């Protein structure tokens, strides 16, 4: 791998909005406590991420992305070269969150 490819790889940003974190948790059928245990954070931290009070640190966002990939959650990381408007991955993630919300609305569970 060339130095240029390494630099591009390092520039990847991970955008985890509150609705995406909740959609991932629900996709994995986990409680906030279970996700917190998996990520080695407090349950309150998960709650704060899901309500938008705080955002995960960059390293935790990378971990969330790895967990999402392993779980088959349809979320893509965004790089500075991914799309011209800079939010291609964000749109994909929002669509996944909407699908997850529609799925839970149909089952009557929240």
Image (cartoon, grey):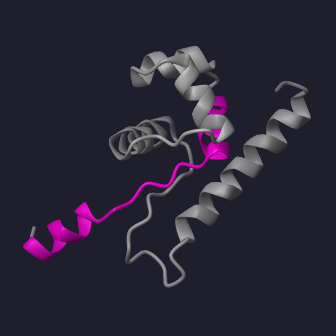
Extreme residue toward the bottom, this view: 84
| Quarter of the picture holding the C terminus | top right
Residue 7, x across and y down, in percent? 18, 69
**Residue 78 as seen in the image, left or right of residue 90:** left
The answer to which quarter of the image holds residue 92 is bottom right
* Magenta stretch: dominant secondary structure: helix
Residue 57, x across and y down, in percent? 39, 42
Total marks shown come to 0
Q: Residue 7: within the magenta?
A: yes
Residue under the point 70% across and 48% down: 97
User: As rendered, which of 49 and 21 lies closer to the eye?
Assistant: 49
Residue 63, x across and y down, in percent? 37, 38
Asked whether the viewer can see residue 28, the reply is no
Residue 71, x across and y down, in percent? 50, 35
User: As rendered, which of 70 and 18 lies closer to the eye?
Assistant: 18
Asked whether the viewer can see residue 92, the reply is yes
Residue under the point 61% across and 20% down: 32
**Residue 22 as seen in the image, left or right of residue 83:** right
Q: Is residue 43 above or below residue 84?
A: above
Q: Is residue 25 above or below residue 95?
A: above
The answer to which quarter of the image holds residue 14 is bottom left
Q: Which residues are magenta?
A: 2-27
Q: Residue 20: within the magenta?
A: yes
**Residue 40 as seen in the image, left or right of residue 21:** left
Extreme residue toward the front, this view: 53
| Quarter of the picture holding the N terminus | bottom left
Residue under the point 42% across and 25% down: 39
């Amino acid at each position: 791998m060339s130095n240029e490819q390494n630099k591009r790889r390092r520039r990847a940003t991970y955008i985890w909005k509150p609705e995406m974190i909740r959609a991932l948790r629900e996709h994995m059928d986990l409680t906030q406590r279970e996700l917190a245990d998996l990520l080695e954070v407090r349950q309150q931290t998960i709650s704060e991420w899901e309500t938008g009070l705080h955002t995960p640190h960059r390293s935790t966002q990378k971990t969330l992305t790895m967990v999402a990939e392993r779980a088959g959650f349809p979320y893509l990381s965004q790089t500075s070269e991914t799309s011209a408007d800079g939010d291609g991955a964000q749109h994909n993630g929002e669509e996944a969150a909407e699908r997850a919300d529609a799925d839970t609305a149909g089952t009557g569970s929240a």
